[in-house]
Amino acid sequence: MLVLHQVHKTFSTPQGELPVLNGIDLTLDQGESLALMGESGSGKSTLLHLAAGLDVPDQGHISIEGQRLSSLEEPARARLRRQHLGLVFQQFHLVPSLNVIDNLRLQARLAQREDAEWTAHLLARLGLAGREEYFPEQLSGGQQQRLAIGRALAVRPSLLLADEPTGNLDEQSADTVLALLLELVAETRCALLMVTHSARVAAPLNRLVRLHLGRLEDPRP
Amino acid sequence: MSYYRLSAALIAISCLILTGCQETSPEAEPQGFAGLGENAAAFAEANAYTPLSFPQDHGPHPDYRIEWWYLTANLEDAQGEPLGLQWTLFRQALTPPDERPDPTPWATDQVWMAHLGISQGETHVAAERFARSHSQKASGQAGVKAVPFQAWIDDWILESPPDANFEDFTLSAYSGEGADRFGYELTLSAQGPLIWHGKNGFNAKTVDGQGSRYYSQPYLQITGRVTRNGEAREVSGKGWLDREWSSQLLAPEQTGWDWFSLHLTDGRKLMAYRLRGGGEEGGDYVFGHLLSADGQTELIGPDSVTLTPLETQVVAGRDIPTRWSLTLPDADMQLVVEARHPNRWMPTSVPYWEGDVVVRQAETQESIGVGYLEMTGY
Amino acid sequence: MIWRVLATLLAHYRRHPGQLAMLLLGLWVASALWSSVQAVNATAKDSYARANALFSAEVDQLTRRDGQSLTRDDYLTLRRAGLPVSPMLEGTLEIGEERLTLIGIDPLTLPNDNALGGNGDALTAFLTPPWQTQLAPETIDVLGLSRRQAPGATPTVDNNQRLPPLTLRPELPPNTLVMDIAAAAALLDSDNTLSQLVTAPGALTQPPDGYRLSRAATLASPEQLTDSFHLNLTALALLSLVVGLFIVQAALGLAMEQRLTTLRTLRALGVPAFTLTMAILLELLVFGLVGSALGLASGIWLAGQLLPDVATTLSSLYQADVQRSLVLPWHYWVGSLVITLGGLLLAGSGVLWRAARLEILALGQSQAWRLGYQRQLKRMTQGGAVVAVIAVGLALWLSRLPSGQGVLVSFGFVAALLLGSALCLPPLINGVLRLLQRLLHRRPLAHWAVADIQLQLPRLSLAMMALLIALATNLGVSSMVGGFRLTFLDWLDQRLAAPLYINASPSTLTPMLDWLDAQPDVDETLPTARGSVDLLAEKNARGKETTRERIALFGITPAPTITNRWPLLDTQTGRSAAWSALSARSVFINEQMAVAKQLAPGDVVTLETPQGAMPFEIAAVYPDYGNPRQQILMPTDVLVQRFGGDIASIGLVVNESADRQALRQALADNFDVSPDALVDQQEIKRLATQIFERTFTITRALNGLTLGVAALALFATLLAQARERQRQLASLWALGVPRKTLTQLPLYQLGGLVLLTGVMAIPLGIAITWTLVAIINVAAFGWRLPLYLFPWDIFITLLTALGVALAAAALPSIQLWRSSPQAMLNKGVV
């Protein structure tokens, strides 16, 4: 499903070269869920962005569903993203100009894979039924993140990439959102790569890896 | 020609003449009253060696800087009310003879100014005229001709009949329109000879020898009609015509004069003046001339007159002496000369005081004559 | 505390220098254009004021009834009769390209309280050789001298004579030389001839026999004539000011929004609302002063660039001289500052209001804005409707005013029209976008694009309103100028029927006529004449009105060469009937007179002739562009014989084979004229067209600048929200929209928006053109123009606006393209 092989990434900063990823090898299979942990600034988000094709590695390669991202042009990478990937961000990234239902089906429509039944189902599962005409700013934080998750899953992606999806939520909303996320991931049988710094959030996932000094460590003995 | 450009011209001239702009500094060297003390090197100089020559000398002398035909009159109307009047034509040369412009139609080397004044009781009216001319052009807006005698500016004119020999004159001068109209129409005839003030008519004005050519006709008998406020009345009385020309009348340090022309009831005439400054050791320069009724005998010469202001009044914001003591020790005369009314200010471009006076014996206060007083430089 | 607060507030601009730049830019352009036009107006006013200064400089003028020129003899005769007249000479001196008015006066008799006193020297210098040339310091530039060399200099003029030594008189009007009449007579070679005899107003109750008296009051001052022209300039400048303030408003609003958190924090930390508001006010004042200073500096520069054209316009249209260097009185500086600061406070009043009512907790704020915007749109619609009603009311008022009146009402109408349309623009766009959103429901990206631009509308609407106003004005003004140009050139073609013209003094032209008729090469002579007459009464459909007014007369020779082409606007029974009627009993009048006196063909004017008052029927009305005054037209011989007019020029039709050079030489040999007295028709056309072009240079310049300011407003607004746009685009990119598509989206969005605005501007522009040609021009210049529209120009203007919009929109796109969107996602913006 997702394979990272010897991925290196270095950023240029005013203080000099800053190596962030230093030879990452990672494989994620269909239906598998993986928690990626590490301290702030350890490169978790960078790794996620590389996996989403939002950024390109300096060395190594990344493939999704057998397609090497580095072999794809930008438009193809974008197509891959809208058709096969779901992205959930800590800051939700909802489109403020669109209402709930249009936000929910935006990516599915962009990918020309809208499934009205599935959308309606998702809306109900997200607890947003009856709020189709609301605009994002009229929702609570938890509702907004659920909508963002729904938007990512509306396209029935094979891989869901989530970056601290509960980072902006209080504990109770976080638990609800996380539970919903895992349920829906299980329902769609997509793979999940979730960046988090919270062991509590990481706990329900199949696997856990820790990013430390640019390398992955398996924390389990 | 637009309104606009016209006004431009008006601005130019009003600035030039009224405010003087920055052309001359007020701290300039003293130049006597109205520039009459200005140095006049390139002009002809008045002297005592050429005798006066008539009738030519009744006409203008453009080689001299300044000149005037100056008439004052002490008249009475039908009710016996005294009335004074003045008519003067001044000539001023703008350039010395050798710097004159060519006589093109508008070229100018002479500027003419005329004053008209009528006084009675507390009233006093005055008017002023200006004109340009060129000395090599006979006719113009203003001028003087010796034969037959004519002195004019615009429609103001003093003239003699062709054969009158400077003895008979008519004078006509009016100003204003309608109810504001004033002026006179007079007939004048000489009852005595012309009087020359000084040797050959040269009248020294300072101890340094500056002076003028100066003669008078003080024996004029006048009848005529005076109009004021549009209303005419018959008048008659005595007149005095002065003729004077010079290139430097005053010394630079002389600032003005007080000038008396008096008709005494016994027929004698008295001319006296005081030039302030320019006398010995910086004192005043005083001159007097007492003439017999027939004009034949000169009774008093210079240096034997004293003139002392007795009383001043504020006229037009200035202190003007309106009562004078005039003494002629040689003739044993002590006179008091008093203005009939202080309001005789001439608000002309060169302002001065000019008005009718009464003459009294200092001791008895008995009225012994009338006359005219001119005071300048106050 | 207030200084601490102010420092905190200002710190924002250190992080966002772009916003500061935009704010200052807005203030700068607003105040620059405004102050430049005000500088031009102030300078012109100063020139007029000098003309009217010191004395109520009105004078009455005498002319001879027999039409002969005045001479020195007239002067002497009148003076010796006791009339207080003063002689005056006026002429033109040419120095290279420039023409100076020369005035010769006699200071001794000018109607003033004269004084000959202690100033003998100054008077003598003025009256005697080498005389003096008095002139305003500005006029020195024309003579090619520096101000230091000027006093006492004796420059040479084109006829190889030297001017008398120069003396500076700052209070004189520009381009005017004043000197003694003797010196002027020598320079003008006028001998005994006089231009004028003048008297103090009212000094004469009636004219002397054989003379005609023109009262001062009947002569119009340049200020009255040029009022409308300056009003036009002011209106355009005001427009730029408003547009500039739109930018300021946008910048302030943005800065306020971004600083809301800071403001709330400050309030939470215990800063009273009053202090906060005062700090913002203080901040506004600081910006206002900096902006005004920048604006004034560049405004003065701009005015210096515009002034020569304005001066040319005023002198060619109104014969009013305006100096070519700026004169700025103290009230100009204060006025400009007050206007800029006042405008800034007006633009900033919303911000101040919000700061004063700021809620410390942001509760419910973010949810409320959408509703708030809907409410705002509703208010805009209502306001727009109210203003539209006002516009209709003004239009009704205008339709009832006689033509040639109501400049202010027309400007009010145009302003109401512009404001009403501007207010209706955002609701209209919003409506269109909602409709589109519904239509594009099935196309997610287009749907997003429409929804997104709708979301931007609150911020963009001000810039769009400014663009609408500027576009409409631009279209209106350029159609007017373009239409005028067509009409004018056409008119010139018709008016200049003869291929050659001779210009010289009347005394030379009159004997020349016979000589010309005897020349074998000359087929036809077409003399024109000028004169003036007292209009005693006029009778139109509404009744008879008596008056006494001096009106200019113009004479033409009604030969077929002329009558076949001479343009007429209105006749009673057709062209040929009008021409055959033009005779000793019928006249034509120019459009200016028809408008001012509300006369039409068939009406009657009573003119004073040497035989007494006589009625003349008006047979036709003719266009007379470029003439500020009313005029009556009649055959040349009638004008010369009955009204004492002078031959003004002779039109010549010559053989095909004629040798023009030889004719030129023969003229110069036989008469006292220079070879340039014979002018080619083409040359006259070229000159006239040149004057025309310069007349509208300033209009065009201001027009272009206003559109430029509007473009800047749009650009600045887009720039201010570029980061926000990038974030939106980055989100879409993360969702799998290719970068290329994303970079194109803003172009479509904004291009569409501007096109929509542009399309709305077209009918508005046409309405403005109509108001200009049918009402404002008639009142300002006295002529009405046909309404011309130029589709190609409209298209180009729209294209330009579109280009500007796309350029502005391209900026976030380019940034997106160049920087990694991933960085956008990562940055604090997210």
Image (cartoon, coloured by chain):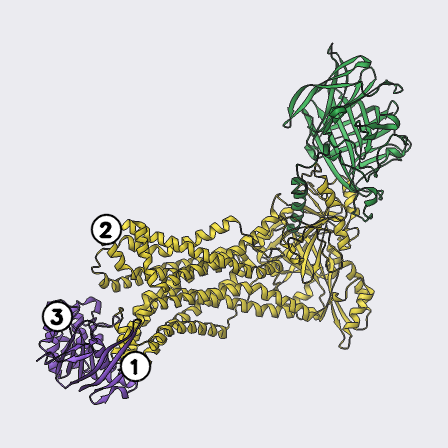
User: Which x, y percent locates residue C800?
Assistant: 45, 73
Q: Amino acid at mark 2?
A: Gly
Task: Please name which of the two marks, 2 or 1, marks the residue nearer to the observer.
Answer: 2
Q: Residue at x 54, y 69 (%)?
A: C482
According to the picture, the residue beneath numbered tag 3 turns out to be A174
Q: Secondary structure at mark 1?
A: loop
Tag 3–tag 2 contact (CB < 8 Å): no
Residues at marks 1 and 3, CA–CA distance in whole angstroms: 32 Å
Q: Who is closer to the viewer here, C547 or A143?
A: A143
Q: Amino acid at mark 1?
A: Pro
Chain A: drawing colour: purple
Discs 3, 2: same chain: no
Please say if C207 is above or below B275: below
Please say if B137 is above or below C232: above
For residue B288, the mark is none
For residue C270, the mark is 2
User: Which x, y percent locates residue C720?
Assistant: 35, 66
Q: Residue at x 53, y 63 (%)?
A: C699
User: Which x, y percent locates residue C517?
Assistant: 80, 68
For marks 2 and 1, the one nearer the N-term is 2
- Looking at the rendered structure, the number of numbered marks drawn on it comes to 3
Which lettered chain is shown in green? B
Residue, far bottom? A66
Q: Amino acid at mark 3?
A: Ala
Q: Chain of mark 2?
A: C
Mark 2 neighbour density, 10 Å: few (under 14) some (14–19) many (20 or more)? few
According to the picture, the residue beneath numbered tag 1 turns out to be C738
Discs 2, 1: same chain: yes
User: Which x, y percent locates residue C701?
Assistant: 52, 65
Q: Is residue B237 left or right of residue A192?
A: right
Mark 1 neighbour density, 10 Å: few (under 14) some (14–19) many (20 or more)? some
Which lettered chain is shown in yellow? C
